[in-house]
Image (cartoon, rainbow, N blue to C red):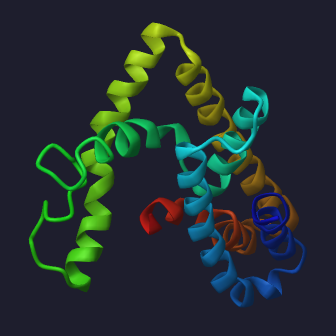
Amino acid sequence: FWAFVLFPLLPALSYARPALLLWLLPAQLYLSYCAGVLTHNQVHCKTFAGSRANLTYSSWLSVFYGAPIASWIPTHLLNHHRFPDRERDVTRSYRLSPQHNLWQALRYTLWCGSWELPLVFEYARRARQRRDRGWRELRVQLVALPLVHLGALGLALHLHGAALGSAVYLLSMGTAFLAPYFM
């Protein structure tokens, strides 16, 4: 229900009625967080029995998560769960500071991507060399994500012009790019 009804419904409402943008924004941010939760669950335990259904669902989640969810494999499964909050965990909570406060939480969240990116690039390089299922999943998600977002941006600009269309896209579909920061 969340993934297949609510994720597309809120942007559709924003596109149809731009006057609702600010009213829908809190719900849209909540759904961005939910996209992270569903992504986390999909990476840990596939939702469907069939590989095609899982590939389609992973690509769908990638669109609303704002990043290919295959990037969780090297960063979350192969690093964080292998070395949970220890020295070799690139996302260990004390990496910037042992303090636990709002400033540290914000800094940590913003830095995490730069620490994880080398792991993602290395994973993609190895998957490409092997030409395995991981490479296929990553490729499909890397194609789906920009295609859908460019299409959504184009539609918003076509329907509402440059200024309002940009706002419609950013406050509805663009919130997906915040989801990685929630997780």
Give me the residue at 62% from left, 77% from top: 30
Which residue is at the far right?
Answer: 16
Residue located farthest toward the top when viewing the structure as drawn: 130
State the residue at coordinates (69%, 81%): 27
Q: Is residue 137 above or below residue 41?
A: above
Residue 77 appears at what percent x and percent y? 40, 41
Name the residue rendered at 67%, 76% in the picture.
28
Residue 181 vertical position relative to residue 41 in the rendered view, above or below:
below
Quarter of the image for residue 125 reads top left
Residue drawn 26% across and 84% down? 102
Q: Nearer the viewer, residue 46 or 174?
A: 46
Q: Nearer the viewer, residue 108 or 79?
A: 79
Q: Looking at the picture, how far across and down is residue 57, in whole percent?
A: 73, 43
Question: Which x, y percent locates residue 181?
Answer: 43, 65
Say left or right for 46 vs 92.
right
**Where on the picture, by quarter, is residue 8?**
bottom right
- Using the rendered image of the protein, determine whether residue 68 is visible from the camera's viewpoint: no
